[in-house]
Image (cartoon, rainbow, N blue to C red):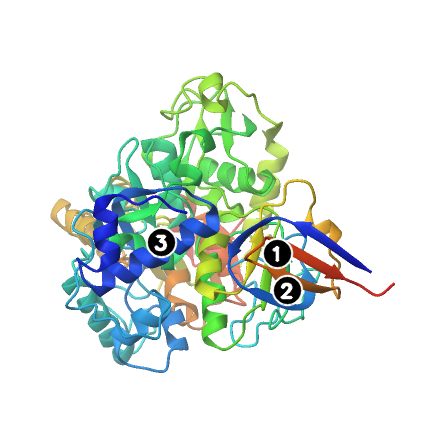
Amino acid sequence: MKEIIKGRGAIKGIAEGEALVCPDSIQGWAGIDEVTGVIIEKGHVAEGTSIAGRILVIPSSKGSNCWSGHFNSAMINGVKPAGWVVSQIDSRVGVAAVVVGSPMVVDFSDVDPCQVIKTGDWVKVNGDSGEVEISRQG
Amino acid sequence: MVRLTDVEKAILRGDNGRLQQKALENIISYAEALGAQELCVVTKATLGLGAQPYLNNIQSDDYNQIFSRVYMCTDEVLDISHNKFSAECFCMTCTENCDTEDYEEVGLTKEYFDKNRRFLEVARAAGVSMASTCTPYLLGWLPLKGEHFVTTESSNAMFCNSLLGACGNPDGVEAAAWSAICGRTPKWGLHCAENRYASHEFKIECPAQSAIDWDVIGYTIGRLLPAGGIPVITGDFAYPTIAEVKQLFATIATTSGAVMCHILGMTPEGQTMTMATGGHGVKESFNVSTAEYQKSLTMLCDVTPGPVDFISLGCPHYTLEEIRDVANYISGKKIKSGVRLYLWTAYPIKEMARASGYLDVIEDAGGRIMTSSCPIMVGQSIMKQSRGVVLDGAKQAHYIRSMTDAAVYYGDKYRCIDAAISGKWDH
């Protein structure tokens, strides 16, 4: 079963991978382990899961002014999401987008990707066309 | 496609050198990611520099290489020391991870201290002024109404947007560096008038008469504010003073992502409710009740009384007036043996405290005035084997909990000084 949702391409390129959906985003400070990429935010829906190689699906950023810096550190340590799907971009996400450089689609007007996409779905992010293709079993 | 001016095209061509060219390339990518159509001129910047802990991810001792990789996001090694930052943008350093003069006192090594000074020296050569404070507005770094700024300090962003009417987004250390270097940022978000209106009202129905009241009010507003919201504060209260508003802005930005807040009748873009909301009204109203205030206090201060040995005042950095208040209160008293009492401020303000006689009074009582940093910036080393930590800043109390197993107490500066004298926290 395939579904395509359309947003705006923020970082060009095409990436695909298994979705990791974080409807409450990930906090900057003490959000991810910058060496392993594992989410360490206490009580987070995906606590203990690594962002490495995943398609990270978030509504926007959360907390820390230097949100991008935590993803920057993780990337320098060789850990980064393969692509991003962001409901509505904000300035912190915009910087993280450039710093990490993975394909990103943002600003969905008629659907909320955090609702449509489920963790474990196979997602193809097209930062050139703004299309996000979701494949799931059944 | 981002529209560029002739000056921007020249920077992009490399007319001002490779460093500014790369910075502008990054700013343009950032603008494209945001969907911004043009850039605006940035005239003020504060930047966290020196040997910040996240630089340790790079296995190198060459600051040019480290700076290029971490801040400029390139494997190309850019020569920072021989390439000036933008002349249009006045850039000062934000807080460091060490006191300006003393590393042993805060549990750091001479090796770290020397590395920090060496890294800062490179930034100084590139044209960055040395201030090393989270309150640059106390030192004359003041972006005024309509001026565009960048900063790595969220409480400073909140202060400048809200109280001064200047324009800045929360965009982190990398983008702040790009902007300080090329003097541009995307014209997007809080740089545009239509995005600066209040979305949520907060009616003050709790005590609002002291720095700690406003500290707790800010913490509470941030807790209740939905993501992406901009608060407008209403109610029957005397307008907060500089020492009070400084606390308010620091704590809203601790528990939320907001960097703009209107105070009805006080802040320049919130003179009336129509002005504050752009005539659109607010989406939701909250009461900052005494119950919510107490709930915040409970989150910040441990309930079980106990011995204390580490007392830290000044988050954000103290004004000279606050240092004077401490000196007046502590004059003739002595803090308990084995207890450390620190006041944190900017080093020029420490000099003013020295000239005014406050430093001698505080040192005679056994206290110290520390500069350019704070416990959460220094990290765990500063607390050594502390059993009880006492703080008068909610931002500090919020973050320090993840750094220590010691009891954490929070209260106004006078109560904190009493604890330093008695060596215990009583309820």
- Badge 1 amino acid: Val
Q: Residue at position x 37%, y 43% from top?
A: B157
Residue B25 placement, left or right of A23: left
Residue A110 placement, left or right of B330: right
Q: Residue at position x 38%, y 23% from top?
A: B266
- Residue A136 lies in what quarter of the image? bottom right
Label 2 marks a residue whose chain is A
| Circle 2 residue | A55
**Mark 1 burial class by Cα count in 10 Å: few <14, some 14-19, many 20+:** many
Q: Marks 1 and 2: CB-CB under 8 Å?
A: yes
The Cα atoms of the two marked residues, 3 and 2, are separated by 25 Å
Residue B343 appears in the picture as rendered: no
The Cα atoms of the two marked residues, 1 and 3, are separated by 21 Å
| Circle 1 residue | A85
Q: How many marks?
A: 3
| Circle 3 residue | B27
Q: Nearer the viewer, residue B176 or B397?
A: B176
State the residue lying farthest toward the left: B355
Q: Marks 3 and 2: CB-CB under 8 Å?
A: no
- Badge 2 amino acid: Ile
The answer to whether dots 1 and 2 both sit on one chain is: yes
SS assignment at label 3 = helix
- Badge 3 amino acid: Ile
